[in-house]
Image (cartoon, rainbow, N blue to C red):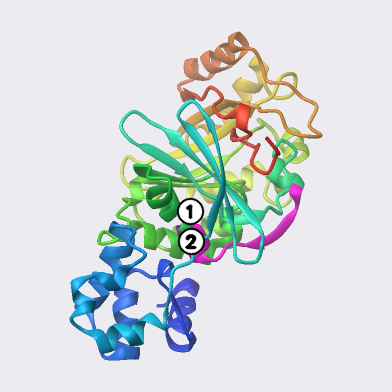
Amino acid sequence: MESDFDILIIKRIKLDDGMEILEFTLDQLTCKFRQEFGKGLFHASALSREIFKFGNRNFFDANEFTTSPVFAKQLKNKIKLTPGKVIETFKENNLTKFITLLSDGERIESVIIPMTNHQTLCVSSQVGCKMGCRFCETGRMGFKRNLQVAEITGQLFNARFTLKENIKNIVFMGMGEPLDNLNHVVQAIRVMNEQRGFDIALRHITLSTAGLIGGIEKLGSLNMSGLRLAVSINAPDDKIRSWLMPVNKTAPLQRLKRALEMFPLPKRGCFLFEYILIKGLNDSPKDAIHLSEYIKPLPVRLNLIPCNPVNGFNYESPCDDDMNRFADVLTDKGIFVIKRWSKGRSVAAGCGQLGRKC
């Protein structure tokens, strides 16, 4: 049975006057070549290799096309490669935030996070966001529009080939709510995952959500085994979470938990929970105990993140000692805790800061 995003791609294959190459997996590109030109895998593989593996914008210089000049000329009028233009970069040590100018003049932000032997790319899925979380600068922008598939995959193209970074992990934790743009995000993940293309394994891709239950259920039905799901929790009870995150009013914690219990995790798989620690609001030992009670028996790794400065949100980060004490309570209750010390604050690249002027 075809899913919504499969139908979306099939319609484009049949109806589009042009091909935005960054929107296609190799199989889809091969299908397009057969329909439009009577060509197949040989030329589709060459085009995919030149663009996704090498970042070659002059892809018609490849031998497969120089030896087929008539086809190359036909194809040249059909292919589009528009990842957006990187117009600014900001650095804090080895972390890089870059701003992409899109074709309609809108701008999005992405972050390259240094790891031990490679980098993780934090990508955006929307311009702005509908969720309105109080601790998030993007939420304060309001929603402008969804990103198209190529505008999502274009962030990876630019990170690898414009900025020359060794990207091995993808996290959908940038601007926007990924599950609010699910069809385009899922297709972007398939393009990023394409082994003969960008070749990012699903286990190295994490999708983060504020807790859209319908989106979680739909994602679970797609059988994308290995894809990691992160959930922004940020509170031990509905009262605090509804104030911090308006989505909780329609998707309260117990409903969210039931949806997660039904989600098809792989064997020995787990969820990532993100908890923004806010001084005097959700950081007491009692909050930690209530949070541990909520988490059990879900298989969870908890990312504990101190809140970052955001315009109009007049709360502070807890000190290191308070963060350690909160983590210790959870650890004593059997919760796996990862403490994420802030990175990128000075260039407004920290959690919740995208969209804020540096």
**How many other residues sit within 10 Å of disc 1, few (<14), some (14-19) or many (≥20)?**
many
Mark yes or no: residue 280 visible.
yes
Q: Quadrant of residue 107?
A: bottom right
Q: Secondary structure at mark 1?
A: helix
Residue placed at 73% from the left, 33% from the top?
310
Crowding at mark 2 (Cα within 10 Å: few <14, some 14-19, many 20+): many
Mark 1 to mark 2 CA distance (whole Å): 7 Å
Decide if residue 225 is on the left or right side of residue 83: left
Q: Which residue is mark 1?
A: 155
The image shows residue 343, relative to residue 207, as above or below, that is: above
State the residue lying farthest toward the top.
Answer: 321
Q: Residue at x 21, y 84 (%)?
A: 68
The image quadrant of residue 321 is top right
Query: Residue 64 placed where, x, y %?
Result: 19, 76
Give the quarter of the figure containing the C terminus: top right
As helix, strand or loop, the secondary structure at mark 2 comes to loop
Residue beneath label 2, please? 83
Q: Which numbered disc flags the more N-terminal residue, 1 or 2? A: 2
Q: Is residue 298 left or right of residue 70?
A: right
- Magenta region: which residues? 141-153
Q: Nearer the viewer, residue 316 or 148?
A: 148
Check disc 2 and give the amino acid type.
Answer: Pro
Amino acid tagged 1: Gln
Mark 1 near mark 2, Cβ–Cβ under 8 Å? yes
